[in-house]
Image (tube, rainbow, N blue to C red):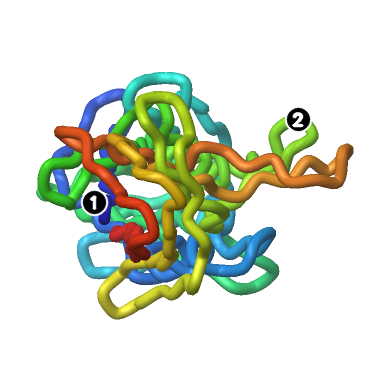
Amino acid sequence: MSYQLKINGKVSINGKEVKGLNSPTETFKDDVVTEIASPEKTSVVKAINRMKIYDDTGTLQEDLAISKIFDNTSESPPNVVFRVSYTATKTYNIARIDLIARVDTTDYVYFSYTLDTPVSVDVDYGVRIDYKITITMTALTTNTSIDSAYTKINYYLLKILIGSRTIGDVEYYLNFYHLEIWSDTTKVGDVTEESRTYDTTNNYAEYKGKITPTSDISYNKVVMHCMGWDTVANDYAPYYGVTLSLSSPDTLYTDVTYTFYFRIKI
């Protein structure tokens, strides 16, 4: 079974949306699939904290700290907005905007937006740039769909990107944790993990597990929990990472071993 994280980016300059191409970078994709398939409590994805602005010759013109973040993860679909505001000290055309995770002296470019038509700025010109990132989920396996009520990995990925990996007492990670078989909202089986792998060339992470039922199981959902850690209780606090609903119920039969492959692609 497989699903995909879909990334959408929009940019507005001084309140006006500008058309262009948003590109999640290979660095971002690699970090996401690496964290998903890593051992529990492994953090790889970093928080975005800077924006770089390039002109139409490819020259870096501004390297700015994010001045404000809008957390719209409660919306449907969840999204976040990164804002910088500044006054230009020279004349140039804004042609490309990058979102950066800077850790110590290393910059990780996560998203890049190339404008269809560059926007000119002049000396003493006030500029406000809003870069909106929306992450949605889609099922790639035939006859399955995403159950949004039990799918939160896109929500927590956005939280991590805005620097909110810890919420209350719980640290949230993208790591695979445990795969369950459900009938509607009731768990009817547990899948025993055999391996977790990732492929940064093809941008996917995969969980492999097996189940041998001791009685027939009718099910219509497969639920992947992801890793949460309660820092006060010092215990696991897993959350619903992704839930795939089947278009019609299926059956796992007694004493037959079934192998489940659960893959996320970005």
In the displayed structure, 108 sits above or below 154; it is below
* Tag in front: 2 or 1: 2
What residue is shown at x 50% (from left), y 49% (from top)?
A: 190
Residue 35 placement (x, y as % from top left): 53, 64
Residue in the foreground of this view, choosing between 130 and 103: 103
Residue 86 placement (x, y as % from top left): 49, 39
Answer whether residue 23 is visible to the viewer in this image.
yes
Which quadrant would residue 132 be assigned to in this image?
top left
In the displayed structure, 44 sits above or below 75; it is below
Task: Name the secondary structure under disc 1.
Answer: strand
Disc 1 marks a residue whose amino acid type is: Asn
Residue that label 2 marks: 168
Cα–Cα gap, marks 2 and 1: 32 Å
Task: Name the secondary structure under disc 2.
Answer: loop
Answer whether residue 136 is visible to the viewer in this image.
no
Disc 2 marks a residue whose amino acid type is: Gly
Label placed on residue 22: 1
Q: Quadrant of the C terminus?
A: bottom left
Q: Quadrant of the N terminus?
A: bottom left
What residue is shown at x 36% (from left), y 76% (from top)?
A: 200
Q: Residues within 10 Å of mark 2 (few under 14, many from 20)?
A: few
